[in-house]
Amino acid sequence: MRTSFTELMGIEYPVIQGAMAWISDAVLAAAVSEAGGMGMIATAGRDAQWTRKEIVKARERTQKPFGVNLVLQEQDWREKLQVVLEEKPACVSTGAGNPVPLIAPLHEAGIKVLPLVPNVRLAKRVESAGADALIIEGMEAGGHIGSISTMSLMTQVLPEIQIPGIIAGGIADGRGLACALLMGAGGVQMGTRFYASKECGAHIRAKEAILAATDTDSVTTGRKGSLVRSLRNPLTELYHKMEAEGRAAEELSQLVRGTSRKASVEGDVEWGLVQAGQSVGVIREILPVAKILNDMMEQAKEAYELLSGYFSE
Ligand SMILES: Cc1cc2nc3c(=O)[nH]c(=O)nc-3n(C[C@H](O)[C@H](O)[C@H](O)COP(=O)(O)O)c2cc1C
């Protein structure tokens, strides 16, 4: 498939495997890239040494382009940026913080820059600063989220930008991909769907929690500005109970701090947050990433044919 994003990155399918802290390592990222998408290594919670090791490992597993995600609120993001500048993955996606100062040094190293934007104002600002593509993530996404839905964001951001827009948040199959492309996007980014993939190294109990979840099971914790979306469990129930009791913000954030690792690495899906998006209900099987991508292309084609049928005589 050819889109503005596949052309930009020289890849086969317009699908990014969204960075997932504690989850998307070299193995998952390389598998996605090898299958024709764009794999992303998540560095949140990890150090610079781990970042270098994973980039080297991914390169041993695939010659195709893959990327690295930097979360710009972390204390040591500059050290990780230095590693990235030296190791030169194909692209860097950024989450939180201001990506503008990173654009020039990353470009000098030949690395494409894909900042995550949660609104029109930031999208325009980051595009004019030289970003290569934008990840437009709505609040249906798993993990840390903004406050605008994916449909509203793509409706409003895409007409305002010239560079490829990558839609994220609640995209879990080829119908979502077709929808984003019809809206004028260059591709999509999925996290939750790849969480429940064969090559993902997350704990089996976390993957099984994703398979068991239905449309109403994805809930948010946190305050405006730092909302996190994950699956309802005893921890989110306790959080909401304490919130209703009017407990202090610090006590509430202490309750959930660091608990994503607890679920995804240790497998404690009751007292750890299984971060997952709102379209989790269509994810029913742990599949190899190549099958996820192939199925998506088939479904997108079917969706396109369905729509074009409406216009024929
Ligand atoms: C478990 C999990 C961890 C995530 N960690 C990060 C991260 O470290 N950095 C980032 O930019 N986005 C992160 N995200 C967001 C994803 O990259 C992606 O944009 C999101 O999952 C898309 O929505 P979906 O889950 O509905 O597919 C995370 C998402 C999940 C589900």
Image (cartoon, helix red, strand yellow):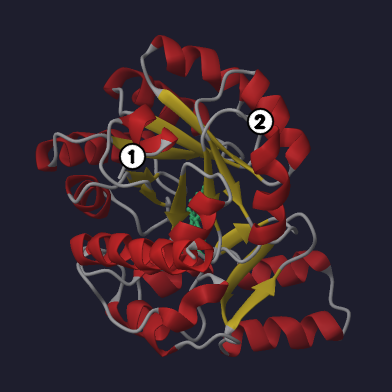
Name which residue type carries label 2.
Asn
Q: How many marks?
A: 2
Residue ID for mark 1: 2
Name which residue type carries label 1.
Arg
Q: Residues within 10 Å of mark 1 (few under 14, many from 20)?
A: some
- Towards the viewer: 103 or 72: 103
Query: In which image quadrant can residue 95 be found?
Result: top right
Q: Residue at x 39, y 64 (%)?
A: 305
Image x and y of residue 240, in percent: 74, 83
Q: Residue at x 36, y 15 (%)?
A: 110
Relative side of 226 to 84, left or right: right
Task: List the single residue furthest toward the right.
Answer: 246
Image x and y of residue 57, in percent: 17, 40
Q: Is residue 267 above or below residue 228?
A: below
* Mark closer to the chain start, 1 or 2: 1
Task: List the single residue furthest toward the left.
Answer: 60
Q: Residues within 10 Å of mark 2 (few under 14, many from 20)?
A: some
Q: Which disc is residue 98 wearing?
A: 2
Q: Secondary structure at mark 2?
A: loop
Q: Residue at x 19, y 52 (%)?
A: 31
- Towards the viewer: 286 or 57: 286
Quadrant placement of the N terminus: top left
- Towards the viewer: 160 or 292: 160
Q: Residue at x 64, y 57 (%)?
A: 138
Camera-near label (1 vs 2) is: 1
- Towards the viewer: 291 or 220: 291
Q: Is residue 267 visible?
A: no
Image x and y of residue 216, in percent: 60, 87
Relative side of 197 to 212, left or right: left
Image x and y of residue 118, in percent: 68, 47
